Each structure stands twice: as C-alpha cells, then as structure tokens.
Image (cartoon, rainbow, N blue to C red):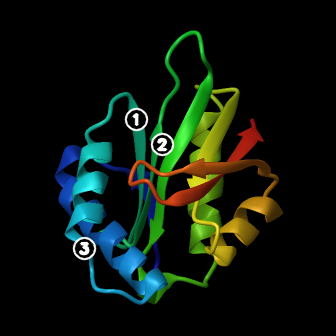
Amino acid sequence: MTHTITPGTTADHPACADLWTAALAHRDGTAPDPQARARARRALRHTPSLLLLLRAPGHPPGGYTLTHLPTAPDRTAHLAYLAIAPALQGGGRGRLLLDTTLEHLARAADAVTLQVAPANTAARALYESTGWQPLGPDRFDSGRPALRYRKTL
C-alpha cells in the first residue's frame, strides 16, 4: 500500500484524535485514554496550525503531524503531535512525515520545538538522529514529565 503525505482538514480531526489515542495506548501498553483523545481534539482546533496526514487512498490517516505555527514576531513553531498507527510503525514513515513537516515549516518558521516523553526512546532516537537538540526537562499540558527539543530550520 502506497502512502502519501497531504494536508489535513477539519474533517480529519476525529480520525487524527483516534489515531493519537491508539498510538499512545500501544506505546504505553494501556487502554485508550479518553482524556488523551480530548486533549488531541483541543489541539487540533488550535490555529494557526499545519496538519499533515500520511494516508493511503481510500483509508483513514495512518499518521499525522500537527504543528502550531509561529505568531509574529516569534518565528518558532511547535510540533505538538506526531503519530503513526501502530501497524505502520518501524517502516520509516515517521521520519518521512517529520521530514515533510519540516520542509513545510521552513517557509513559516526559523525554528521548531517539541516535547517527548522521557521513556519514549524510539521517538527520541528519531529526533536526535535528525538534528534536534535537547533543551532539558519540561511538562506536557497533562502534567506528565517531558523533555523539550529544538531544531533550527
């Protein structure tokens, strides 16, 4: 199955929130968390933002990124979500989606930040292998510990 990366629309928000919830549950070995889904839905309504989908024709999104675009005069964007469906993980799709997102951001931002769970070693390895610099400890909106990263574009 061939996947392409396309811009998302508000019609994709429910599927993206479901995908995020499923990816977190898979990563953490837990049941899907309705509060995580609600947070994702709120974030998807944030504007201005860039929503990019990894999708095969006729299928729901297999992955997505949601980036909050910078507001003047700050030219730092924030990559709020990067999710790949559990069945599609490990095939380089996350890197492709991340690279494509950064290409789109280069027109609107000078830098981008993100937060990642300290125990999410796969994500941290991806970010560090693509030039992201760790900035130190932080907290997610949920209150859970996070690490903050930054990349200059």
Query: Residue at 68% across / 51% down in the picture?
Result: 137
Element marked by disc 1: strand
Image coords of residue 66 (percent x, y): 43, 48
The residue identified by callout 3 is 58
Q: Which residue is mark 2?
A: 67
Mark carried by residue 100? none
For disc 1, the marked residue is 49
| C-alpha distance separating marks 1 and 3 | 25 Å
| Nearer to me, 56 or 64 | 64
> Where is residue 57 drawn, in percent x and y?
31, 71
Specify the quadrant that holds the N terminus.
Answer: bottom left
Give the answer, above or below, for where 38 lies relative to 101.
below
Query: Please, what is the three-letter code of the amino acid marked with disc 3?
Result: Gly
Residue depicted at 38% across the width and 54% down the height? 142
Which numbered disc flags the more N-terminal residue, 1 or 3?
1
The answer to whether one can see residue 1 in this image is no
Q: Quadrant of residue 36?
A: bottom left
* 86, above or below 145, in the image: below
Q: Find residue 10 and report its image quarter.
A: top left
Foreground disc of the pair 2, 3:
2
- Between 69 and 148, the one nearer to me in the picture: 148
First-in-chain label (2 vs 3):
3
Q: Would you say the residues marked 2 and 3 are in contact, meaning their CB atoms lie under 8 Å apart?
A: no
Dot 1 or dot 2, earlier in sequence: 1
Is the C-beta separation of discs 1 and 2 under 8 Å? Answer: yes
Q: Is residue 59 left or right of residue 54?
A: left
Disc 1 to disc 3: CB gap under 8 Å: no
